[in-house]
């Protein structure tokens, strides 16, 4: 499967009692589709998957597929630090009708590089749904190295990587290695760092899985589309228009600022699951200023 464009790592709206706000989730789906996104990710890390129970996790995936109804691509977050648990979630996403599954690297276990290959290969061999590997070592303590990424690209069913190591040099090395193996058209690199989306796409990336697009989807879509259409002048303008806001949206642990911004904008977001909690007053003022400067509140 080819992954290209703007995908949104959706938040999970919560009611005041901490339960999942299904109506709010459906509303956000339609809001984002109306703003031109190419796909939506449900129950990923921005969706607070670490504190969703299995029933909630599966329900979000079902609601995502139901509400989208084929209008854009649907991607389910199905990663875990347990291969068997990730496999079960991925099979559920496949049966639910998702277009793809996003699997974060196993966290805390710190599997070896060849163990990472085994992990993704085991799941790909047991499912018939396109898989996107997700590399975010700052959260997991586990980094998919360049050579390992190439090995993942050779696995039938592993079609892309969301790269959030924070290194454009690494993305360049991955793309160059894919070129040397003739795999550049079979395996996509998606930005997992919103502020680096432009440079990542400039060196071979094909899109972004974005948390900040929950808040400023229109401009993210415009920037990514501009890059795909080789209009780097417009893309650069949009990059700098969004930069203050993107930085503010990651001033504290994701998705705390994103959910706070959505509440300020009147979009369904609600509370946070502990251990996450409200922003500090100082950082909240920085976020409000960025939202005002972006004409979003």
Image (spheres, rainbow, N blue to C red):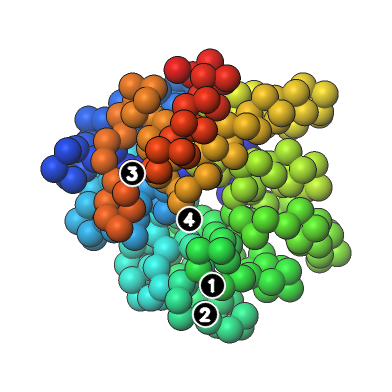
* Disc 4 + disc 2, Cβ < 8 Å: no
294 w.r.t. 250: above or below: above
Task: Using the numbered discs, state the Cα–Cα distance from disc 4 to disc 1 in whole angstroms.
Answer: 18 Å
Mark toward the viewer: 1 or 3 = 3
**Sequence-earlier tag: 4 or 3:** 4
Q: Which callout, 4 or 2, points to the residue nearer the camera? A: 2
Specify the farthest residue to the front: 282
Graded by Cα atoms within 10 Å as few (under 14), some (14 to 19) or many (20 or more), the crowding at tag 2 reads some
Single out the mark in the foreground, 4 or 1: 1
Residue 36 visible to the viewer: no
Q: Position of residue 178 (x, y in %)?
A: 78, 61
Q: Looking at the picture, how far across and down is residue 54, in whole percent?
A: 23, 60
Answer with left or right where residue 65 lies relative to residue 130: left
In the image shown, does 109 or 277 lie closer to the viewer? 277
Number of numbered discs on residues: 4
Apparent side of residue 217 relative to residue 185 in the rendered image (left or right)? left
Give the residue number, with chain letter if any, for mark 1: 141
Q: CA distance from mark 4 to mark 3?
A: 27 Å
Q: Residue at x 55, y 27 (%)?
A: 290
Can residue 12 be seen here? The reply is: yes
Q: Earlier in the sequence, mark 1 or mark 3?
A: 1
Picture quadrant where residue 195 is located = top right
* Numbered disc in front, either 4 or 3: 3
Closer to the observer: label 3 or label 2? Answer: 3
Determine contact: label 1, label 3, CB under 8 Å: no
Q: Residue furthest left?
A: 17
In the rendered image, which residue does mark 3 sit on? 278
Give the number of the disc on residue 110.
2
Q: Closer to the N terminus: mark 4 or mark 2?
A: 4
Among the two numbered marks 4 and 1 on one chain, the one whose residue lies closer to the N terminus: 4
Question: Which quadrant of the figure contains the C terminus?
Answer: top left
Point out which mark residue 102 bears: 4
């Amino acid at each position: 499967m080819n992954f290209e464009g703007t995908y949104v790592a959706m938040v999970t709206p919560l009611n005041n009692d901490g339960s999942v706000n299904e109506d709010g989730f459906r509303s956000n789906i339609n809001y984002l589709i109306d703003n031109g996104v190419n796909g939506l990710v449900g129950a990923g890390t921005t969706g607070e998957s670490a504190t969703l129970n299995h029933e909630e996790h599966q329900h979000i995936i079902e609601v995502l597929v139901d509400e989208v109804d084929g209008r854009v691509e649907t991607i389910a977050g199905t990663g875990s630090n347990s291969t068997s648990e990730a496999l079960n979630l991925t099979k559920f996403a496949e049966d639910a009708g998702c277009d793809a599954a996003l699997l974060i690297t196993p966290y805390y276990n710190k599997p070896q590089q060849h163990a990472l290959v085994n992990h993704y290969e085991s799941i790909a061999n047991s499912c018939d749904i396109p898989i996107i590997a997700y590399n975010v070592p700052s959260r997991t303590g586990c980094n998919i190295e360049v050579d390992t990424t190439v090995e993942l690209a050779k696995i039938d069913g592993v079609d892309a990587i969301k790269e959030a190591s924070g290194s454009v040099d690494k993305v360049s090395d991955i793309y160059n290695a894919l070129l040397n193996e003739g795999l550049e058209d079979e395996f996509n690199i998606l930005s997992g760092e919103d502020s680096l989306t432009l440079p990542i796409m400039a060196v071979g990336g094909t899109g972004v899985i974005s948390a900040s697009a929950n808040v400023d989807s229109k401009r993210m879509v415009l920037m990514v589309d501009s890059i795909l259409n080789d209009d780097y002048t417009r893309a650069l303008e949009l990059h700098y228009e969004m930069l203050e806001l993107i930085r503010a949206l990651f001033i504290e642990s994701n998705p705390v600022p994103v959910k706070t911004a959505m509440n300020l904008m009147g979009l369904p977001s609600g509370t946070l699951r502990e251990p996450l909690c409200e922003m500090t007053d100082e950082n909240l003022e920085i976020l409000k200023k960025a939202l005002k400067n972006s004409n979003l509140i």
